[in-house]
Image (cartoon, coloured by chain):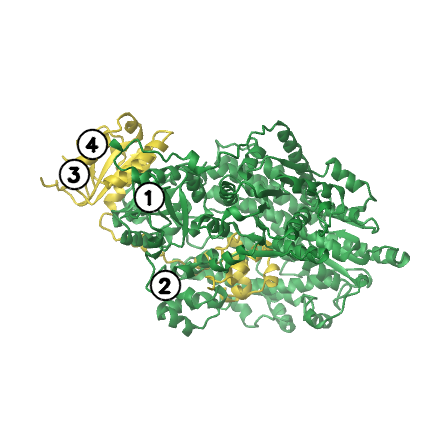
Amino acid sequence: MSAEELPPVKLSLPLEFQQEIFRELRSEDELLIMARGLGLLRIVTNFLHSCDAAGNNLILIIGADDRENEWIGESLAEHATISRAPKCRGLTIVSNEAVTIAARAKMYANSGIFSITSRILIVDFLSEWLDPAIVSGIVVLHAEKVVATALEAFILRVYRQKNKDGFLKAFSDVPESFTYGISPLATMMRNLFLRKPSLYPRFHVEVANSLYGKKKVEVIELEVDMTDSMRSIQNAIMECIEASISELKKGNSGLEMDDWNLDNALHRNFQAIVMRQLDPVWHRTSPRTKQIVRDLGELRQLLFAVLTYDAVKFNQYLDTIVAAAQPPPGKIRQNPSPWLLLDAAETMFEAARRRVYTGKLSEKIEPVLEEQPKWEILAKIIEEIEQDMYFHPTKLDDSSDAILVMCGDQAACSQIREYLQSMHKRPENANEELKDDEPSAAFMMRRRLRNYLTWKRSFTKVSASLDSEIQKAMQATEARGGPASRGRAPPSKRRRVRGSAAAASGPSRPELNSVHVAGDKDAHIAALLSNLEVTEVEAQERAEIGIDPLEGMEDYYELYDMKDLVVVHPFDGDMDDHLLEEIKPRYIILYEPDLAFIRRVEVYRSCHTDRSVRVYFMYYSGSVEEQRYLGSSRREKDAFTKLIRERGNMAMTIDTANLNPEETFLRTINTRIAGGGRIAATTVQPRVVVDVREFSSSLPSLLHGRGMEILPCMLTVGDYILTPKICIERKSVSDLIGSFANGRLFNQAEQMSQHYENPMLLIEFDQNKSFTLEPFADLSSAAAATMAAPDLQGKLVMLTIAFPRLRIIWSSSPYQTAEIFEELKKLQEEPDPVKAVQIGLEEGEDAESGAVSQTPMDMLRVVPGITDKNLYAITAEVENIQELANMEEEALCRIMGREVGRKMWKFFNRNVVDD
Amino acid sequence: QALPVPTGPNTILVSPRQKENPILKEIRSTPWEWADIPADYVLGTTTCALFLSLKYHRLKPEYIYARIRGLAGKYALRVLLVVVDIPNHEESLRELSKASLINNVTLILCWSAAEAARYLELYKMYQNTTPTAIRAPQSRTYAEQMTEFVTTPRSVNKTDALALVTNFGSVRTAVNAKPEEIRILPGWGQTKVKHWCSAVRDPFRAKT
């Protein structure tokens, strides 16, 4: 059935390859892998619309994120209006437990298109609030994430078991993810229960024809030179990265480390490469190695920050990193980041500081405020465009005269916006040589520097006050003065006086008398501030800059004239398609290169033959930005080549018939029963009651795979109930460490022992990770043995002594766990879900109301004074963390009792600046 | 028959059956002495331990069950100390998990003689201590509490926590900060801002 046969459906797929894909999707189930930027979501929505218009379909979308839901919802509504299809229902989003089960069941009964969070859908499927048999089809977005143990794979298995006729389409635009491991494509296809992969790289004939056939996009490429200091910072960071990598190699001999090199370090997924090697032994790697891995992440971020942040913000970032790296004074255990000790790091800090200001404090301080080279280029391009528009007034086409500037993220966006707004303003005492019409960021940078200096002062205080409680105890002599003050020369007495006097007119002037007391640090800042006195122009402007220009839009009911607009926008995946369609820009400036966006412009251009587009495209030459851009296009191409080869070799013998668990699972008489005495026990499908929060792990999926019936319930005590007597609390190794530390495990063991005959603690190691605990503390001397705080083994010992009835299950992987569960359940009675839910509930508490969101609860648990017992007093009265933080001390005391309430209030309200 | 009482309060009793066991050499911080006991080790008035190497268990699967029977229901806490010294441990461990349930023994795994000895010492050491170390959260400094709180949402790290709180002055103001205000902090990208803001604004529990 093709699109033409459905008269009421109007599609928005003007290009041939898009129509081709659509026809394919309509005719059979497949996995579609597309190059980024070719408009995957547009195809998805058109397909969904064609189903929606037919009416009476119950279609589920899984794997969509918030933005995609928004996109799909809007486009479906738009399509419905255009097609005037009366049966369209649009999209319903079920993204959290806020929608009650009863309401959900009602919604499903009405059919339509639903985008559902996997965790909710699997619970609904298993508890039969939604019968998989009535689903018309499932659409899987981000198919690259559907690994064998993923929830999505679980959902699809349940779906296919009970429903052989509904359709199933999977989509992905990340071809790289399908190339790791052995025959990855075939494996993924098996997880998705699909037979046919369909690949659309940019070099696909159909795609190339659709895009090259029409008029091409006019592209102007601009290589921007980095400043010398940027280059030297970049080199220094590279050196630090290299040193860190070799340090990492030294500390971890015996691992496969060929991929750990500087080249790979520039890739986005370098962290993943390192982690893939270290993961199996992660709980045994030394703290030093862990520190270096964290460092590498931070260094890589710095590498891009030097290109995108302005000089002041970059320096501020360095300050924060250095401060965070300082160990709390007096602690013995410390793993200083090795790169901080390198000469290169010193060079980097020095260069970063010199981009902001120079001069010795004893003499004259000069703000330098280096500008990012791209700013000037951007200003010039805009000028050129304006001239161009003036000399060649509107051509006869649809494009608007708006200029679209695309950049990496919101932060870059506001930076550019601020620059464009202020580039013709001058601080009054500015250097004379600056001509008035030349763009300059001096105005903006001076303001940033002032903010920086104010921040720096409070920051120094904060670090000092955070450290002081430890310092007091330790009577540290050396670490005083706060970490940030290192390596700075003390100013001379003369300067100090001058500085503070002059600073009196500053906007956030230092307290005159505090200069002497607080020491050199403040004097230094005061001196700097004095050099940056606010001029009158600046004073006027202060208030209005930095405010979102769209504020107050509610009161402004006119359309902006496109001609006057410069739109600055961050890259935002598929949302950018909308942007192009709405703004219809003739001029596009790419402030940073982005492969997908260039393709989007190509698609946009080909869809609208009557519009002309000119793209300016700039990057720093010889920078990591350039390398990353080139690398990403190469990797995508390689990935597709690999996939095409694998598809060619793929054996098409995926058996979807063998899905019925009843067939594969042997429910015959157990051979261990002598004489076949109790056959009755084996005629029911084995059943496990599972806490709904456990569905983020892969174990429920595996248990289901072994033929057990999974009953999702809201459990107060335990995670898995195997029999009326056996209750199991599952802990991964990291969970184990964490819940020992906050006392949670003790409470859980206590509750389990209270309500069940056989309480069990399952310690589950990860598949592929080594099956040992972390190295235990060396206690060769008896003195050390009694002094030291108990290590993990020690805590386990304490736990078993406290609860002699608690059994421990050690499992090397979730697979192993599933087998152990099966073993434990043999010949036992089945658990009663109703009873399991009731156990541990307080008087009058309702099991239904227990749906909680995980992260806020975890945050609540680490607030001082909160225990597992008084946790629910909070959640019953308070809506969220924000409300809690804003509560008055009396109100908190009323709910929590005096002591705890005061403790909590202090935690939220303690002022780290003025302390 | 009365259970033998150790000569000193801090002595581990060892059955002569364990004579060849290399872990005896590793017990260094606690004294031990031979004694005629049904278990392999006696670690306290109500605690005993049996020792099992998986290699041996594979050869003589019946051995350990006979030993457990030999304990004859004595001792409240019966530890089965298992050394994992074979690569394909899955099947044995599955069987032992089931056995621990039926026979009331607590399974403790270790991977070396040194670790096994360490467990014995620990059991002796903590025999009469109250489990305060695992019962309540350890007291920490404000900086640690604050960092733990702020870094709970995904992808927020220590540096970010410091930047956030120093910039806004207190945890309360940091919680109240608008996304636009947080975004200008160095290191806080879009994902982090989103995770943080939704973590502090999402309701604890759904309205019914």
Mark 4 vs mark 1: in front: 4
Please say if A747 is above or below A666.
Answer: below
Task: Kindly check if marks 2 and 3 are in contact, taking CB atoms under 8 A apart as contact.
Answer: no
In the picture as drawn, the residue positioned furthest to the right comes out as A391
Q: Secondary structure at mark 2?
A: loop
- The lab-note entry on whether marks 4 and 1 share a chain reads no
Give the mark nearest the N terminus, 3 or 4.
4
x and y percent of residue B199 in the render? 51, 59
Label 2 vs label 3, nearer the camera: 2
Return the x and y of residue A732 as percentages of the image width and height. 41, 45
Residue under label 2: A845
Q: Nearer the viewer, mark 1 or mark 3?
A: 3
Q: Are marks 3 and 4 on the same chain?
A: yes
Q: Residue at x 17, y 31 (%)?
A: B16
Q: Is the C-beta separation of discs 4 and 1 under 8 Å?
A: no
Quarter of the figure that contains the N terminus of chain B? top left
